[in-house]
Amino acid sequence: MLHRDTVISDIAVHKPKVMAGIFAAAFVIFTLMGLKDTIFGALMAPVIGDPAEAGFSGNAATGLVLAILLTVNIVLIAFLPLRYQIGIVWLQLLLLFLTFFYSFDLKLSFIQTKIWFMITQGLFTTLYISAISIALASGLAIIGAVAKLSSNGFAFAIASFYTSFFRGIPLLMQIYLIYLGLPQLGFVIDAVPAGILALTLCYGAYMTEIFRAGIQSIDKGQWEASRSIGFGFGLTMRRIILPQSMPLIIPPTGNQFIAMLKDSSLVSVIGVWELMFLARTLGNKDFRHMEMLITAAMIYWMLTVCLELIQSRIERHYKSPQH
Amino acid sequence: MTKTVIEMVGVNKWYGDFQALNNINLKVEEGDRIVICGPSGSGKSTLIRTLNYLEAHQEGRITVDGTDLHPRMKNVTQVRTNTGMVFQQFNLFPHMTVLENLMAGPIWVRKLPKAEARAQAMTYLDRVRIPEQADKYPGQLSGGQQQRVAIARSLCMNPKVMLFDEPTSALDPEMVSEVLDTMIGLARDGMTMICVTHEMGFAKAVADRVIFMDQGEIVEENAPKPFFDAPQNSRTKTFLGQILQH
């Protein structure tokens, strides 16, 4: 949280001028959007008559009602305590989203028939590919970070070449290069291992930098104290340096994991049956693309929310009394 | 017969063009209590840090308990566990409890069984008079308590010589004496120690030799009484005049 001042300023949205401004802007924008032919227009039918024949006044009336609703809504929410404000705004944005999706005329029964397969096959594949990749990438990142910090010319050169290359090339291209390139060398590789390898190498390169920064942030006195009680390099790293850099490494690593979860969708291009692949193929036969894409999007989102919760748990764990 | 623990012969060290140590000759025997003082930048910290090879010297010879210090030595662990180092900034491990700090070396380096390491740690915590803080984290202790834990951590490795690098310089004034008392106690028990400090009262009370350094050289070396009462070198006189006038 930002470090807040103790002086409290007036709530902006309780100033008549500000609210008048918001109301006017909302009215103009809503009117110009021409909402009479949408679900809002349909709801307004008792007032404006048949939306199709209502003309500009229909748009204006719909815009006016929506602008009033929005303004009153904002004023009322501003009175509530912080926690309720957050909850209600979340809920309203979610409802807006659902309305948006609803307007696509989705066929829910179609989703129902496919969703189970999407979860057991797609979600499961996405999860295990991401989990294996992030675990391997973390191991690679520790090695890479130590190599980048070492005074060994070979180690530094190899590590910096690695991070430069894999951070400098689109992940999609890396997936193709590995899947199509390795067989040229005589290694025929399946789609799943190829995907895992590409994700590992790419995220290992990003995480090398995260681990390097984490290790570098530890005071040199810790190294000296550790050495002076006889710890060698391995013990110092394992017992002293890495445990202390964890609180710095975990938040960005969590971000990387969330990013990877979604980037794993790129693996669908080589035919791995993960979420994205299923989202694109399951709806093909019935021309129900939107249903499947939105379902997959929702699953990704839920998953990300879960991961964010887990991440904040871990961060809290590392903020125990010693810090 | 006393045994030589540390010997420095013609030691020189440079940081780039800057000469940090200039022809240092020093012999420390078992039971010696040596205080090193001097203005900042005079090389006293560098000197003490070369003794457990946290810093490498470039010329001359340093022997610690019979082991020659050089970049390719294989038994650096032995040298470092034989020399207990206490730092100005304590450098306790913040992610471990006090007890874990004390047990780390004995368990992972000396391969002591856990129960034995714990018993030994408690003995030394008793000795620095803070056994009740055993399960706290360093961040929860005062500076003086942290420094006493750091001393206990070094003692847990059963060193042959204790090195103190300005152990009270980072402390609030009211905490200096609790650390000095601990060090005086160690000296009484016959511990060999080399101490970089500006605490002249401590030097008078326990040192059997005081060394004054300036610009990387040992300028004057004498027993505390003649050192303070009748300093020979003009640089020593100026320095003592500056720090004793208050």
Image: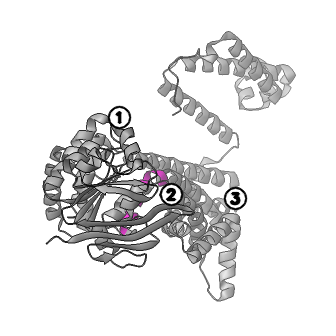
What residue is disc 3 on?
Answer: A286
In x, y percent, where is residue B89?
37, 48
Q: Mark 2 vs mark 3: same chain?
A: yes
Residue positioned 26% across, 64% down in the render: B105
Residue range in magenta is A235-249
Q: Marks 1 and 3: in contact by CB < 8 Å?
A: no
Q: Nearer the viewer, residue A205 or A280?
A: A205
In x, y percent, where is residue B2?
16, 70
Sequence-wise, the earlier of marks 2 and 3 is 2
Whether the magenta-drawn stretch holds residue B69 is answered as no
In x, y percent, where is residue A175?
66, 71
Viewer-nearest of labels 2 and 3?
2
Viewer-nearest of labels 3 and 1?
1
Q: Is residue A309 left or right of residue A157?
A: left
Mark number displayed over residue A216: 2
Amino acid carrying mark 3 in the image:
Asp
Question: On the image, which quarter does residue A229 sit in?
Answer: bottom left
What residue is disc 1 on?
Answer: B245
- How many neighbours does mark 2 have within 10 angstroms: few (below 14), some (14-19), or many (20 or more)? some
Question: On the image, which quarter does residue B239 sit in?
Answer: top left
Amino acid carrying mark 1 in the image:
Gln
Q: Is B241 drawn above or below residue B235 in the view shown?
A: above
Mark number displayed over residue B163: none
Q: Secondary structure at mark 3?
A: loop
- How many neighbours does mark 1 have within 10 angstroms: few (below 14), some (14-19), or many (20 or more)? few
Q: Secondary structure at mark 1?
A: loop
Q: Chain letter for mark 1, please.
A: B
